[in-house]
Amino acid sequence: MASRLTPEREGELYAATLDLLREVGYEALTMDAVAARTRSSKATLYRQWGSKPELVARALRYNKPVRIEDVDTGSLRGDFRSMVAREDDCEMERNSALMRGLMHAVHENPDLFQALRELLIEPEVTGLNQMLQRAVERGEVSAGNPALAFVPHMLVGAFVARQLLEEQPADQAFLSRYLDSVVLPALGAQPSDNP
Amino acid sequence: MASRLTPEREGELYAATLDLLREVGYEALTMDAVAARTRSSKATLYRQWGSKPELVARALRYNKPVRIEDVDTGSLRGDFRSMVAREDDCEMERNSALMRGLMHAVHENPDLFQALRELLIEPEVTGLNQMLQRAVERGEVSAGNPALAFVPHMLVGAFVARQLLEEQPADQAFLSRYLDSVVLPALGAQPSDNP
């Protein structure tokens, strides 16, 4: 799909989509409202994104200020810390409320689930696996470590259980403790030779 | 609250509650329907449980065939395996569909969230912590291991992310791999001296 929007304009449309999502929720969000808010036409929105779930999933992905696949600090611990520091606590709390609402909407909208998986979750998991692969190549993690396959599960647990069990959003201090206490030890991670 | 029901009768009422939950979902479940299905009076239900969220939370807890606090095999790995083996895969899939529906209902019903926390989640977390405490006393896990505080988070991650990322319920084979690959290594668990 050839983009007919400038990157700036694309960013404006994504920001407006997330604002509306926060204001009215997924069910009540309409392409009409996004078009009105951004003074664009519905035809443009559909030409660019095809559907509401795709627009929402791409807006969420765009909203990540740093892409996980661009993180490469030279050590696994550094990469994890950069990943966690992508959003400050305030941003993280805003986004975690948004994600809870969307997880709810997913229950009623399989097409939203599909879009979130393809456009948001799978790229993040792929980026995470590249990060882990580099740690293996540097000798920080043994290639056969069975925990390598479960890093996304460990991380999802941190976010979901923090909210479910402690009724708090996972903030940076919590995630840093979790990475050092759970994820790195499960991976048997050794400090990198190239600091 | 003095129980006026025999344990058998209590079990029948819990089973009928879960059947109705599976059939109609939390929102549509009424105390009237539970009373009609079990040929009891609504007054009895309210006297015994006080409210719909409490009845539902207690029914879910009763439904666990083995209580986590009764599991004590003499080793942490054995305890975890017994915990996972409490439900067979078929039961686990049935219950995981039920729990997904309830997590959805929680969004709209804070009183349900409160009841699930107090009557289901907190007793499970307490039982899990007792299990971990025994492992510390046996010398299997070091008392200062920081992963001890995060075992519920690791386990929640296994259930939620298996569904979210792989669209499969967490079955016994998956959970056993996860325990051996993630949870026990993060805890630095050593085999017990008393096998």
Image (spheres, coloured by chain):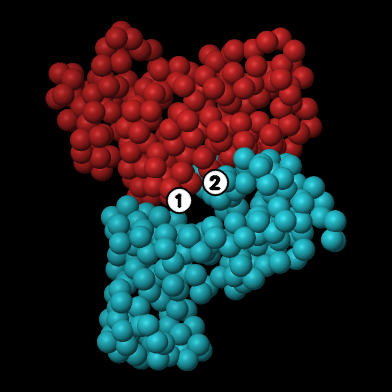
Chain colours: A red, B cyan
Whole-percent x, y for residue B38 in the image: 39, 87
Q: Quadrant of residue B92?
A: bottom right
**Which residue in the structure is indicated by mark 1?**
A165
Q: From the viewer's perspective, is residue A29 above or below residue B98?
A: above
Can I make out residue A130 in this image? no
Q: Residue at x 45, y 21 (%)?
A: A86
Q: Residue B82, image x and y in percent?
A: 70, 64
In the displayed structure, does residue A191 sit left or right of residue A179?
A: right
Towards the viewer: A90 or B32:
A90
Q: Chain of mark 2?
A: B
SS at mark 1? helix
Say above or below: A84 vs A145: above
Q: Residues within 10 Å of mark 2 (few under 14, many from 20)?
A: many
- Quadrant housing the C terminus of chain B: bottom right
The number of numbered badges drawn on the structure is 2
Q: Are marks 2 and 1 in contact (CB under 8 Å)?
A: yes
Residue A138: x %, y % from top left: 74, 16
Q: Position of residue A91 (x, y in %)?
A: 34, 27
Which residue type does callout 1 highlight? Leu
Q: Which residue is nearer to you in this view: B16 or B66?
A: B66
| A106 sits to left or right of A190 | left
Which quarter of the rendering shows the N terminus of chain B? bottom left
Q: Quadrant of residue B33?
A: bottom left
Q: Chain of mark 1?
A: A
Q: Which residue position is annotated with label 2?
A: B153
Q: Along the horizontal axis of the image, is A144 left or right of A35?
A: right
Q: Residue at x 33, y 28 (%)?
A: A90
Residue at image x 43%, y 83%? B13
Crowdedness near tag 1: few (<14), some (14–19) or many (≥20) residues, C-alpha within 10 Å: some
Tag 2 secondary structure = helix
* Residue type of the residue flagged with mark 2: His
**Left or right of residue A154: residue A188:** right
